[in-house]
Amino acid sequence: MNHHEQLDAWVDAHFDEEVRFLQALVQVPTDTPPGDNAPHAERSAELLAAMGLAAERHPVPADAVRAAGLQSITNLVVRRRFGAGGPVVALNAHGDVVPPGDGWTHGPYSGEVIDGRLYGRASAVSKSDFASYTFALRALESLGVPPAPGVQPLARLRGAVELHFTYDEEFGGELGPGWLLEHGLTKPDLLIAAGFSHQVVTAHNGCLQLEVTLHGLASHAAYPETGVDALQAANRLLTALYEHNGLLRTRSSAVAGITHPYLNVGRIEGGSNTNVVPGKVVLKLDRRMIPEEDPAAVEAEVRALIEGAVAPMPGVRLEIRRLLLAGPLQPLPGNAPLVAAIQRHAQAVFGEAIPVSGTPLYTDVRLYGAHGVPAVIYGAGPRTVLQSNAKRADEHLMLSDLRGATKVVARTLFDLLNP
């Protein structure tokens, strides 16, 4: 039995334990909002400690958490050093998730297993990779146990593995991975981050979110000339914003899996009653940017578009507030060893070729990329987001995917630390 086979055998022998670990994680809610996620971090640390993995607790100060609209965040870091030299490989997954909503036929915090599927909010994205990454690390450590007769001698691993379990992905990641990186609590050489497709993802879109407030003057509908209709101004603005998508469709990305930028208005509030000229309208918009775009230039373009559309409307006062600016992730040249190892072992474990692509989503991984850390997105998450019902009712994970991805990550860690 070679080392890769030994890793596979360890994962198989401990898979029931891995499933129980994931069930325990799903059973502690991490709905964000409201974002009271420190209790989940404490439970995770307890479970890790029971497996011999000491987790550093890094609480984010309460004032910073409240300013972000959340209640509590404690990020976890587990560090395992093998031999001297070699790379530091970080594995990052996030525990926060959107609230479950309605329509569940299985308890959203049950962790129930039926027909090879484990149900519950965050079972697929991304508590699944708390489990796959933890047990991949444990499998790697098992190679330090004296081998049985007939198996490969012990490997001489060089480098370190870190587990980063964070709790701010839904609100942008600045208090999750961003906090760990900005405060010098980690400086990995390579990163594997929680997956949400059976591909090796090396690039993703960025996202700009703005809140636009149009102030007019409310008046009685019987005397409309005495007011300034903010909704009429909003109508003009909406037309300009949606027409802008025609231009954005002409800006194609060279990254497979990503098409072009686009703009969406996701929320509109305004007016006070049917017999009142609306004096105030608030729009919230989302502008996705492809990896080739510059975030600052994108924001300047959108602001200019908004200002130009509203300017001809007399009496309307405009306010623009940035809600989020998340830059895109571009592939860094140093990610080649990660990509090659994952593709090789996914082919061996799953029996199918795993393509390299980008994704139109945005993730925490951009924060590592901004610090020069070559990264890929791969894990136990769903074959597709839609297939798993991620962020919808009856989210679930195929246990066969959990088992296979754990083996792929364990094999990849072995190759990176045993060049």
Image (tube, helix red, strand yellow):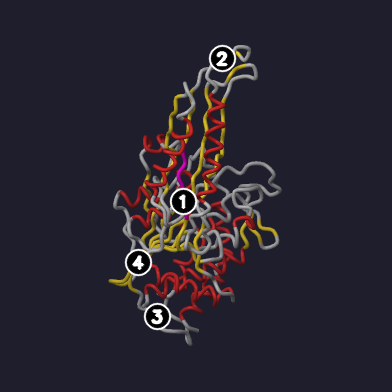
What is the three-letter code of the residue carrying label 1? Met
Q: Which residues are magenta?
A: 205-210
Q: Is residue 121 magenta?
A: no
- Does residue 165 appear in the picture of this structure? yes
Q: Determine the CA span between mark 2 and mark 4.
A: 71 Å
Left or right placement of residue 187 versus residue 253 in this view: left
Question: Residue 355, how many percent across, how many down?
Answer: 53, 70
Q: Earlier in the sequence, mark 2 or mark 4?
A: 4
Vertical order, 9 against 68 (above or below) = below
**SS class, disc 2:** helix
Mark 4 residue type:
Ala
Q: Position of residue 258 (x, y in %)?
A: 51, 59
Q: Nearer the viewer, mark 2 or mark 3?
A: 2
State the residue at coordinates (67%, 63%).
116
Q: Of circles 1 and 4, which is in front? A: 1
Mark 2 or 3 closer to N-term?
3
Most foreground residue, 314 or 126: 314
The residue that label 2 is drawn on is 225
Residue 75 lies, in percent from the top left, at 40, 49
- The image shows residue 351 at horizontal and vertical percentages of 59, 76
Q: Identify which amino acid the numbered label 3 is placed on.
A: Leu
Disc nearer the start of the sequence (4/3): 3
The answer to which of marks 2 and 1 sits earlier in the sequence is 2
> For the point 41% across and 54% down, which residue is it?
366
Q: Are marks 4 and 3 in contact (CB under 8 Å)?
A: no
Tell me the quarter of the picture where residue 147 sits: bottom left
Residue under pointer 3: 154
